[in-house]
Image (tube, helix red, strand yellow):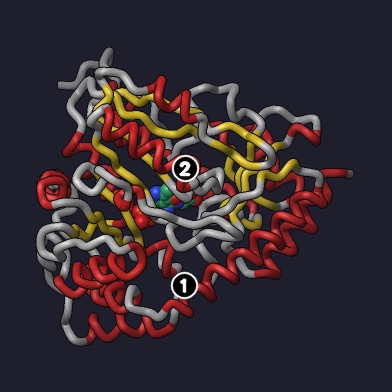
Amino acid sequence: MTSSARPLLNRRLAEFGTTIFAEMSALALRTGSINLGQGFPDTDGPEEVREAAVRALRDGRGNQYPPGPGVPELRAAVAAHQERRYGLVHDPDTEVLVTAGATEAIAAALLALVEPGDEVVAFEPYYDSYAACIAMAGGTRVPVTLRPHEGSFRLDLDELRAAVTDRTRLLLINTPHNPTGTVLTRAELTAIAELAVERDLLVVTDEVYEHLVFDEAEHIPLATFPGMRERTVTIGSAGKTFSFTGWKVGWITANGPLVSAVRTAKQYLTYVSAGPFQYAVAEALQLPDSYFDGFRTDLRRKRDLLGDGLRAAGFEVYQPQGTYFITTDITPFGEKDAYAFCRALPERCGVVAIPNSVFYDDPDAGRSQVRFTFCKKDDVLQEAADRLRRLAS
Ligand code: PMP
Ligand code: GLN
């Protein structure tokens, strides 16, 4: 019998409702608005990669349970990619684990590595699943706020150092960072690595936007810094790199004991997933550099197209150096509440965006920030920018 006095949802999850991405995508659908909320491209990834998935399906590769750690072809391709791009050498058999998107990688890593009561330090605004997964693991999240500084968001290293206590088990890092578009610099990463070594912390680093960096910014994996290889779980995903967010193919790379620990949790979450798609992603990871360069150039142009449109419409725009996203501030419109603004935006001008305020523990820190995605066709971005100009009138 259930007791009516006791809520169904357990205490760990009580603060979590429907994700903001689901809520805002449903709002876009309901109102027929342009959806610049949830980050998914409106153009699928490379034709040859799609064909590779079809071939795998037809050839009966992956239609039954693939091996728990992932198909050997994909593990080899992930290891080769890490070595080719970053000089990080991993044994594909023991140091790579394929997951159901980065989402499962985050969940499995936190469930495996965090004891109830452990503190997990993460940047805020944080990607929403971090808070939920820390909670499910029984950990305590300790946010370090990225703050606007000279037109973009930056990390205060002193605040980060101050956030680490004797109860801290793990740093949960995200670079390039969703939603701010911040790409951590070599100096910042060096300081984070020194802190992790000095305080003997584990590091889980979400690098799903590793290929989406612009201008002078450079993505440098944390695992490449001295003392980090043995304490770092690096997370990647095919969703963002190859524009197949629905395939949900992700992975971790780390040393053997860390992979083994994460695999223990992962095998009881999904066990395995995405059989045929794993073969296709193995091929995608072997695409020539020209694919990655072309993708990046195209996205940078889209960033500028939307950024110009948002500025022209009257938003304060924080320039992202990476990801799919631009964070703005709505204060110039005399507005203060991003959530209310986003709820009303479809009616006001037929566009959907994401209120960053939901990505903060401190409700005041991001109250007036709104995120737009630019991974859409040029004419869609242009139309959205035109519609947003109505805000000024
Ligand atoms: N981490 C970050 C920072 C993200 O923005 C996302 C959304 N793509 C994910 C993880 C989840 O990735 P996936 O779709 O591969 O589960
Ligand atoms: N990563 C995507 C974003 O930030 C959303 C993924 C999701 O809906 N969980 O927009």
What residue sits 31% from the left and 23% below the top? 140
Which corner quadrant holds the N terminus? top left
Please tell me the numbered disc located at residue 187: 2
* 110 over 6 or under it: above or below: below
Q: Are marks 1 and 2 in contact (CB under 8 Å)?
A: no
* 140 over 113 or under it: above or below: above
What residue sits 76% from the left and 56% below the top? 308
Residue 52 seen in the current view:
yes
The picture places residue 148, in percent across and down from the top left corner, at: 63, 34
Which corner quadrant holds the C terminus? top right
* 69 over 231 or under it: above or below: below
Name the quadrant containing residue 132.
top left
Q: Is residue 48 left or right of residue 91?
A: right
Residue underneath mark 1: 292
Q: Earlier in the sequence, mark 1 or mark 2?
A: 2
Name the quadrant containing residue 335.
top right
What residue sits 54% from the left and 68% below the top? 296
Q: Residues within 10 Å of mark 2 (few under 14, many from 20)?
A: few
Q: Is residue 348 left or right of residue 214?
A: right
Q: Which element is circle 1 on?
A: helix
Q: Which element is circle 2 on?
A: helix
- Type of amino acid at the residue the image marks with label 2: Ala
Name the quadrant containing residue 238.
bottom left
Residue 19 seen in the current view:
no
- Type of amino acid at the residue the image marks with label 1: Phe
Q: Residues within 10 Å of mark 1 (few under 14, many from 20)?
A: some
The picture places residue 192, in percent across and down from the top left corner, at: 38, 37
